[in-house]
Amino acid sequence: MVLVAGCSSGSDKSDKPDDKKAEGSARPGSPSTSPTVEAAKFSKLPDVCTTLSGKTIDDLVPKAQSKKGKALPSADTNTSASCLWSGLDGFDYRSLTVSLKLFRSDPGLGSGDRRAGEYAAQQASRAATAGKVTDPKTEKVAGIGDEATTVSAKQKKDGDDFRDQTVVTRTANVVITLQYDGAGYETAKAPDAAALLKDAKSAAKEAVGAIAKGTSSGV
């Protein structure tokens, strides 16, 4: 209730509605604005098993069990997908996994690019601490997508020395995690880590290109 000072109880003014109050009640409320975020560049993923060419698979995974790769289970391949290639050439073992993760823009969560960047940082951290890896070396690299991090580590499995190379790169709102592992069984020597990392970087660049095209590189 608004009390007007200086009016007697019998005056005409006491019976009139307060002008300001009436004016205020008639004015419509200010329209509420919803937060907006930048639209995401990519709306879906390509077939993950076709992001690398057949030649790349031949070079990185000699005598792969399947050049087309093995698609790993996913609830929605439009937003999350992984493909695995593995092979044993004599006593030389190689394993290559490409994982794709797409983030959509959301007013409550942020832009797809920002969300993807946060996830990429988490993936790089996981690669450096996963399992029983030792001597992990993490490095930011340029020239692969919008941003990229490599993680080089060692790991012993069933008495064999593995060299694990991971490249995590973001291209707009998509994160590519490429894991390339190698080992020498029996009398074979452990693979050269620097050579594995070089190949992993090259493959990651190819996968980035496949995302940009929205189509496969071809098998």
Image (cartoon, rainbow, N blue to C red):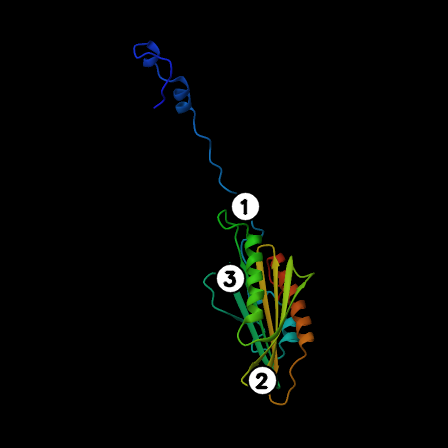
For the residue labelled by badge 3, is the local secondary structure a helix, a strand or a loop? strand
Lower position in the chain sequence, tag 1 or tag 2: 1
Task: Name the residue: 57% across, 74% down.
Answer: 85
- Residue 200 falls in image quadrant: bottom right
Residue 160: assigned label:
2
For the residue labelled by badge 2, is the local secondary structure a helix, a strand or a loop? strand
Q: Where does the N terminus fall, quadrant-wise?
A: top left
Name the residue nearer the viewer: 59 or 128.
128
* Residue 47 sits above or below residue 114 on the image: below
- Disc 3 packing (10 Å; few <14; some 14–19; many ≥20): some
Observer able to see residue 215: yes
**What's the residue type where badge 2 is placed?**
Asp
Lower position in the chain sequence, tag 2 or tag 3: 3
**What's the residue type where badge 3 is placed?**
Ser
**What's the residue type where badge 1 is placed?**
Val
Q: Are marks 2 and 3 in contact (CB under 8 Å)?
A: no
| Residue 208: x %, y % from top left | 63, 61
| Residue bearing the label numbered 1 | 37
State the separation of the CA atoms marked 2 and 3.
31 Å
